[in-house]
Image: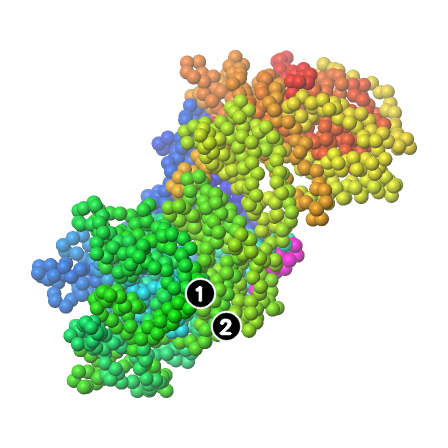
């Protein structure tokens, strides 16, 4: 259903509404008392309404069917059926939508059955067979015509071995393409396929597939699958594409709409890597569309059209395309030359790898280094392979320095300018709206003044209207039908949204509703930002390690596309952006542990545009310059005793692979290019040369083991110890600390990576594939990483060592044992070969000439033919043409200091068996990283730590860097002794400060979302500043605590000394934990790093309450609610041998409802009473300032305590007022005090009400009883006539449970469910994770800033929570609408009451054949709370020959009612009678109740002036305001008691009432089984219990 709709269901004139915008499951119940024969003929109407329209025009569509259609199904049920909606007045207008429903009809005696569970796979099956269509609706025959013209750039699908076998069998000829493609089209359960085109990477089909479909149809996707015909095995899938019909059509009822249409245009396909490799077999699911494709797999030129009213004949299913139609698509095939520029500014956060790292850039087949069909390029499509360098902490990076690799590709594609410009234009509107909407929501979340939030909303609407009123890019001459229709659709929708936004701007009155309306605009605009006809493939950047594809990022081409108009440029075009690479995997494995770790982070400069536009633009990211270099490698071998060029297997000068001869003299500059300098050596930067900027460095070494095939024993071998690249290294015991450094710890196994419990990672052969953390039987090698940290201790030896490294680095040699081994920076004893790179820079005086070398060949001749690649020449020869490498060069670098202010995180994942984690954060910026301290056993850590990354070298102009700063990555981990579990990451942009902080705006902490594998993993509260270290310097370092920097003032939230009081009442409903009962629980309360604990309960079975009812602790908390840390409730169980397992937790994210300000309240109280004392105001004008909850909603707490009351009594000259009885009964005692004594008041304040006339009213008549009051209260005018005529007051009739009207009676104690934390994603659901409840509450208030006496504790006077005996009376009046249980369509109901172990089943009082029985019975039981606090009132169906069936039950928490200050024990009548049928029936008098209420609210006792005036909480109450002359009855009680009762009713205590409670059956708790009218009285047994009411039904006359 779309947003803004509601649903209405009607059965036999019974209707139910569903809220608009509701996405949750809705359950509707209808009850009928009729025979099955009559019921099955009734219709069921399902209607969908548009809530945005008038009722008369709100119907979107409806569906009607008979009840009998459902009743005839198995179990009388429709499970998960789609119903088709139509216009009932115009059924030929087509489908209006679909609704998924389940309908269950329960007859007498039928049992409730649960529906089968749905899985995501259910949505992928054919929906056509599961659709209910309205009667009389004729499905319209429709023909979907798919024209397949040709394909391009398909990958090879056969290995060399299979190709040789096919050649031997005559199935494939020499030199032919290794794929035999055909296409399968699937839609709505139909399938057609094209012919097979043998041996072709670029097949031409020119076929038309006509598919007959009956509409309306539920299918939303057209599936295209390219197959490879395999004569030796089953056919292979090349790639799969799903075309969403939603983006190809429009079904808007307010618009003309249009049928699906597409093209002619190319459709791009993606899947597994193009090169054929057996190790990619596990990624074959990507070719099936089961995840994001990581590689381009080809594209198809196709066209889709739909024609209504016709159905194809079998001869028309597959046929050829007419030549005219083939010719008609030629204008759409015009190609333009595109140039792509990719600059690699940074590659960091690389996981430990075992080979040289290089990056490949490709778009389509252009740039793929393993492509079978190569295209000319301006520069190599890969960066130079380099060994990654360690950052000295946890990651590796590419040591590119001032010379950054860049790649420029030339490709040819169709001109999609009109499509891409429009798409980018709408996406920028969406992006701008999202930013503004987030700003408004953040302002609302921070509880900013309403004016500020409204002002931001108005700015949002103005900005949106301005964007929407702009015109879309115009359409060119040659466009497809879809182009034209989408243009009209987008134009009309944008104009409509603009008009609605203007109207909202004028009419908006509620901020929340306005934000919801803006969200609908955002949803509609996102629906317009779809362009299915973009035929230019995505740009794909691969990271290769040792030649293996390890990770990638796929960037849509429209996001990097250039346009002459800035508003049409792509999101990343011409800018520096950060990209996080990911490993290729199936979607089902995307959120698995092995794919959580980040392979690498890239900082890229991207640009794509027409070739002629590219020549006009100078790419200078961060003011770097593009330089073109000729490149060759000098090679040498070691022949003792020296290095030489003799007897080498490769040329002296060659390319990087050593295959081709590249002497310096063979390079000749192209026309228009000149040499800028002589040849020079490019040094290879080593990890050692980088250490000069570090104060700490993590040394590492790898322990290697092997085994024989089929063996199980792991053994060492000759390369027992190596470095990360696999080269031989000293063992950990032989590794020496370099001069100027000292060890800080011992060697430890690195468990922070994807390894097993012993730290090993496995592979078959590290030269063929990467390592994995799970051991397989075919693995023959394994390794583990040992790490040890050393810190700088500068001395002369270190300086000399660094100078030596620098001198060696200048020579630029790389060393290896053999040519095919991995090269490293510094020579070792076993190295036999070495190489170094020579570069020579070129400059141009003619930008139109491409920098491609014509090389002098061995025959001393230059090639002037078409451009060819070096591989076209035989090894050892000079290639005919050679592409130079391009680099971004920077002349200047600057040192920066990053300050990461990490305050806290919340709602992190639980990774330990205890249900907690030990989180720490890793901050990564550039080529540096550093970790925070570890916070043990928490999911909401507070670090309050500043991480400083100093001397971070960033190349480029500082002003340009400030515009597009590099990103900071924060990764969160759970620390374990064995392995560190990954918790999630977030990426942020720092604030760049170039002036040392002078004049800069104040940095604010912000909440950043933490994600793990696409899932929400919590939030991080932090801020980040990047300072330029120059002449202005940087601000002073923050203060330190325990050897780490804390947040400085101005960044750290403004803290306030705060007290947190906790009412620790007890635990309830405890389940077993780890197979044992929870007998000795205790509670820990943690907030802001402070923890308070209760004592353990000695025996939870005997008394689940704590010995001490309150505790408190003082902590510094932020003043602003936005920065408030969560409060954690932890439940522990004390077991034998000192074990204290953590049973579960509950997290309070918002503490706003528990905040109080007693100091402010006390000051207001004092000033008001002092004004009263000195006569500045009269009593009638006195406004006493108290909390609203103290007068009208007495669930809150006021702030005056005994100390404050005595001070006020002294100030007013009072003698201390009424004193409560000191006698207690050591039980729940909010209302156990003795009657009050009248307070002393001034004599001139005494007064008496007017004397009421001595009118006699005969109240005791035979016509009045309790039922008279009942009928009058429920509105029965006939049976309540006499009662109403006599003018008596009725009872309250609550149509829902009493708890609904009194906030669940949680004003004293709330109930918090305790959850056993999920450790794994596949664990049980929330219901199964509940282990019990904690009963208590919290009060949070500030303490005086001047250190003066704190206010009295607000919960210190909580009542005793010892066990208490109660007398409980349950009055069951009647039941209504019970579900029938007998075959005759009725039930024989009777009530049952269960309280603890006591149960009363009033089977003798059953009502035969009745669904609305009148019971009129009272059940009296004794109980002890809290042991027996849950009251169950049940209704059973009496059966003579079998067990009685439970119809339904309702549950009441007696403890909550008894403890509540709303006094849910016995309802207060509206008049105080001392005799007659409505005699006072409570165990306490009104004045006693009033004083007890004031006491529990920590207020002064009521101040009486005679019997007719009383002041309570500063409010004056007069009896004359409630009674008038002539009202006096002889059975009324004293005036002071009557006035006290009126005051209690004004204070919103529970009145005399009848509550209507819903009955539920535990077998189907969401389905109501009927209603029950009842009420409950609760009396403490230590006080005299009044006699019960007589509610026996009247006898029939």
Give how far across and how far down residue 467 sits, in percent.
Answer: 53, 66
Asked if the stretch drawn in magenta spans residue 1597, the answer is: no
Name the residue rendered at 71%, 40% in the picture: 1351
In the rendered image, is residue 4 in sight?
A: no
Above-or-below relation of 34 to 654: above
Q: Left or right? Give the position of 300 relative to 1517.
A: left
Write the residue at 27% across / 85% down.
668
Disc 2 secondary structure class = helix
| The magenta segment | 449-463
Task: Left or right? Give the position of 1016 relative to 832.
Answer: right
Label 1, residues with CA under 10 Å away: few <14, some 14-19, many ≥20:
few
User: How many dots with numbers?
Assistant: 2
In this rendering, the answer to whether 289 lies above or below 870 is above
Mark 2 vs mark 1: give the one in front. 1
Q: In this figure, which residue is indicated by the disc labeled 1?
A: 794
The location of residue 522, given as percent across then percent down, is 50, 57
Between residue 639 and residue 889, name the one nearer to us: 639
């Amino acid at each position: 259903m779309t947003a803004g709709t509601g649903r209405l269901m009607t059965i036999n004139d019974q209707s139910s509404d569903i809220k608009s915008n509701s996405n949750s499951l809705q359950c509707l119940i209808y009850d009928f008392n009729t025979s099955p024969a009559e019921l099955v003929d009734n219709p069921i109407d399902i209607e969908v309404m548009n809530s945005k329209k008038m009722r008369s025009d709100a119907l979107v569509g409806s569906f009607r069917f008979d009840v009998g259609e459902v009743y005839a199904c198995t179990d009388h049920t429709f499970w998960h059926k789609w119903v088709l909606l139509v216009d009932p007045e115009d059924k030929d207008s087509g489908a209006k939508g679909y609704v998924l429903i389940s309908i269950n009809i329960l007859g007498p005696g039928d049992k409730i059955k649960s529906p089968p569970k749905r899985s995501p796979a259910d949505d992928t099956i054919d929906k056509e067979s599961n659709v209910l269509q309205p009667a009389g609706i004729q499905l319209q025959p429709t023909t979907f015509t798919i024209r397949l013209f040709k394909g391009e750039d398909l990958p090879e699908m056969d290995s060399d071995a299979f190709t040789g076998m096919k050649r031997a069998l005559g199935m494939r000829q020499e030199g032919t393409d290794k794929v035999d493609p055909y296409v399968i089209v699937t839609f709505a359960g139909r399938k057609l396929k094209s012919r097979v085109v043998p041996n072709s990477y670029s097949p031409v089909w020119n076929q038309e597939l006509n598919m007959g479909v009956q509409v309306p149809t539920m299918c939303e996707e057209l599936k295209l699958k390219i197959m490879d015909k395999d004569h030796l095995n089953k056919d292979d899938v090349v790639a799969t594409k799903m075309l969403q019909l939603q983006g190809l059509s429009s079904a808007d009822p307010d618009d003309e709409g249009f049928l699906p249409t597409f093209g002619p245009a190319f459709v791009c396909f993606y899947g597994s890597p193009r090169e054929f490799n057996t190790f990619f077999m596990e990624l074959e699911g990507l070719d099936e569309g089961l995840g994001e494709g990581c590689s381009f797999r080809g594209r198809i030129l196709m066209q889709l059209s739909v024609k209504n009213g016709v159905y194809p004949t079998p001869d028309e299913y597959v046929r050829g395309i007419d030549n005219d139609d083939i010719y008609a698509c030629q204008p759409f095939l015009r190609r333009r030359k595109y140039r792509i520029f990719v600059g690699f500014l940074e590659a960091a956060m690389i996981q430990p790898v075992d080979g040289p790292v290089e990056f490949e850039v490709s778009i389509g087949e252009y740039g793929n280094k393993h492509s079978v069909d190569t295209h000319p390029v301006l520069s190599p499509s890969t960066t130079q392979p380099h060994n990654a360098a360690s950052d000295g902490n946890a990651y590796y990076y590419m040591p590119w320095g001032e010379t950054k690799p860049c790649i420029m590709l030339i490709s040819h594609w169709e001109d999609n300018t009109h499509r891409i410009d429009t798409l980018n234009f709408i996406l920028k509107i969406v992006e701008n709206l999202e930013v503004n909407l987030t700003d408004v929501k953040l302002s609302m979340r921070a509880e900013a003044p309403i004016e500020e939030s409204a002002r931001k909303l108005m700015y949002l609407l103005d900005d949106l209207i301005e964007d929407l009123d702009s015109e879309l890019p115009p359409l060119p001459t040659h466009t497809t039908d879809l182009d034209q229709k989408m243009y009209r659709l987008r134009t009309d929708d944008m104009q409509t949204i603009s008009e609605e936004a203007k109207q909202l701007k004028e009419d908006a009155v509620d901020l929340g509703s306005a934000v919801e309306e803006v969200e609908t605009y955002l949803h509609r605009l996102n629906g317009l930002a779809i362009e299915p006809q973009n035929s230019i493939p995505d740009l794909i950047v691969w990271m290769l390690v040792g030649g293996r594809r390890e990770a990638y990022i796929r960037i849509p081409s429209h996001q990097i596309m250039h346009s002459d108009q800035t508003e049409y440029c792509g999101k990343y075009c011409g800018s520096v952006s950060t990209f996080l690479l990911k490993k290729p995997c199936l979607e089902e494995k995307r959120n698995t542990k092995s794919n959580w770790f980040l392979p690498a982070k890239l900082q890229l400069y991207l640009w794509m545009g027409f070739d002629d536009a590219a020549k006009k633009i100078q790419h200078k990211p961060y003011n770097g310059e593009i330089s073109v270099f000729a490149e060759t490698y000098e090679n040498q071998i070691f022949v003792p005793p020296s290095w030489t060029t003799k007897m080498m297997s490769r040329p002296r000068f060659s390319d990087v692979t050593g295959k081709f001869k590249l002497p310096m003299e063979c390079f000749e500059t192209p026309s228009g290019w000149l040499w800028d300098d002589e040849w020079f050596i490019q040094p290879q930067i080593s990890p050692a040369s980088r250490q000069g900027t570090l104060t700490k460095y993590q040394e590492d070494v790898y322990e290697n083991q092997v085994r024989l095939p089929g063996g199980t024993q792991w053994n060492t071998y000759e390369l027992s110890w190596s470095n990360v690249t696999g080269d031989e290294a000293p063992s950990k015991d032989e590794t020496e600390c370099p001069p100027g450094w000292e060890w800080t710890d011992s060697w430890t196994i690195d468990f922070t990576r994807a390894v097993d419990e012993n730290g090993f990672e496995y592979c078959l052969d590290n030269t063929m594939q990467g390592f994995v953390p799970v051991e397989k039987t075919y693995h023959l090698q394994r390794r583990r990483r040992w790490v040890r940290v050393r810190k700088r201790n500068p001395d002369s030896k270190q300086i000399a060592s660094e100078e030596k490294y620098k001198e060696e680095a200048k020579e630029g040699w790389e060393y290896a044992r053999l040519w095919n081994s991995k090269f490293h920076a510094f020579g070792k004893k076993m190295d036999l070969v070495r190489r170094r790179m020579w570069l020579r820079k070129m400059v141009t005086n003619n930008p139109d000439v491409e920098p491609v070398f014509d090389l002098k060949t061995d025959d001393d001749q230059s090639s002037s033919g078409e451009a060819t690649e070096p591989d076209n020449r035989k090894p050892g020869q000079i290639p005919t043409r050679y592409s130079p490498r391009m680099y971004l060069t920077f002349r200047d670098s600057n040192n920066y200091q990053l300050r990461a202010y990490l305050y806290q995180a919340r709602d992190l994942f639980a990774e330990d068996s205890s249900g907690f984690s030990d989180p720490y954060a890793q901050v990564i910026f550039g080529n540096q990283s550093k970790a925070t301290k570890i916070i043990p056993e928490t999911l909401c850590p507070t670090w309050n730590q500043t991480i400083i990354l100093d001397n971070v070298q960033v190349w480029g102009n500082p002003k340009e860097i400030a515009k597009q700063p590099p990103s900071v990555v924060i990764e969160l981990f759970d620390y374990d002794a064995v392995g560190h579990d990954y918790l999630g990451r977030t990426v942020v942009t720092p604030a760049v400060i170039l002036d040392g902080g002078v004049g800069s705006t104040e940095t604010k902490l912000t909440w950043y979302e933490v994600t793990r594998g696409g899932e929400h993993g919590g939030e991080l509260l932090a801020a980040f500043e990047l300072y330029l270290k120059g002449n202005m310097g940087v601000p002073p370092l923050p203060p330190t605590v325990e050897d780490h920097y804390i947040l400085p003032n101005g960044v750290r939230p403004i803290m306030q000394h705060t007290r947190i009081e906790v009412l620790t009442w007890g635990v309830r409903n405890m389940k077993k934990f780890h197979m044992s009962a929870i007998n000795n629980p205790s509670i820990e309360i943690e907030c802001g790093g402070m923890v308070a604990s209760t004592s353990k309960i000695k025996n939870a079975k005997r008394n689940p309450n704590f010995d001490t009812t309150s505790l408190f602790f003082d902590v510094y908390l932020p003043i602003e609610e936005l920065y408030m840390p969560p409060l954690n409730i932890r439940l522990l169980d004390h077991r034998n041998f000192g074990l204290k397992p953590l049973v579960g937790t509950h997290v309070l994210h918002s503490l706003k409802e528990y905040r109080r300000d007693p100091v402010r309240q006390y000051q207001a109280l004092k000033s008001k009473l002092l004004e009263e004392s000195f006569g500045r105001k009269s009593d009638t004008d006195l406004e006493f300032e108290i909390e609203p909850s103290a007068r009208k909603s007495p669930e809150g707490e006021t702030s005056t305590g005994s100390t404050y009351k005595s001070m006020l009594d002294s100030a007013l000259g009072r003698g201390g007022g009424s004193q409560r009885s000191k006698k207690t009964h050591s039980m729940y005692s909010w209302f156990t005090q003795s009657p009050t004594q009248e307070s002393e008041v001034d004599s001139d304040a005494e007064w008496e009400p007017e004397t009421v006339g001595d009118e006699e009213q005969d109240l005791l008549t035979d016509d009045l009883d309790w039922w008279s009051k009942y009928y009058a209260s429920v509105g029965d005018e006939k049976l309540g006539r006499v009662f109403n005529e006599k003018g008596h007051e009725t009872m309250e009739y609550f149509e829902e449970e009493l708890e609904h009207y009194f906030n669940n009676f949680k004003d004293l104690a709330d109930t918090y469910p305790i959850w056993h934390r999920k450790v794994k994603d596949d664990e049980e659901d929330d219901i199964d994770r509940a282990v019990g409840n904690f009963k208590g509450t919290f009060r949070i208030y500030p303490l005086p800033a001047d250190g003066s006496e704190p206010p009295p504790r607000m919960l210190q006077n909580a009542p005793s929570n010892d066990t208490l005996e109660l007398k409980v009376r349950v009055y069951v009046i009647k039941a209504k609408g019970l579900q029938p249980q007998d075959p005759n369509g009725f039930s024989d109901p009777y009530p049952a009451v269960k309280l603890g172990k006591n149960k009363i089943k009033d089977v003798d009082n059953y009502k035969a054949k009745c669904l609305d029985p009148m019971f009129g019975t009272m059940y009296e039981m004794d109980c002890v709370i809290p042991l027996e606090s849950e009251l169950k009132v049940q209704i059973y169906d009496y059966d003579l020959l079998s067990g009685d069936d439970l119809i339904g039950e309702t549950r009441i928490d007696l403890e909550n009612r008894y403890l509540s200050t709303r006094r849910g024990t016995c309802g207060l009548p509206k008049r105080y009678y001392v005799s007659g049928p409505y005699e006072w029936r409570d165990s306490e008098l009104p004045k006693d109740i009033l004083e007890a209420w004031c006491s529990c609210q920590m207020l002064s006792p009521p101040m009486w002036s005679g019997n007719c005036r009383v002041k309570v909480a500063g409010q004056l109450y007069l009896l004359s305001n409630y009674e008038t002359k002539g009202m006096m009855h002889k059975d009324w009680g004293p005036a002071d008691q009557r006035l006290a009762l009126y005051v209690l009713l004004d204070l919103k205590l529970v009145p005399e009432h009848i509550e209507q409670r819903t009955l539920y059956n535990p077998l189907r708790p969401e389905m109501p089984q009927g209603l029950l009218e009842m009420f409950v009285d609760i009396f403490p047994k230590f006080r005299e219990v009044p006699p019960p009411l007589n509610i026996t039904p009247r006898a029939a006359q």
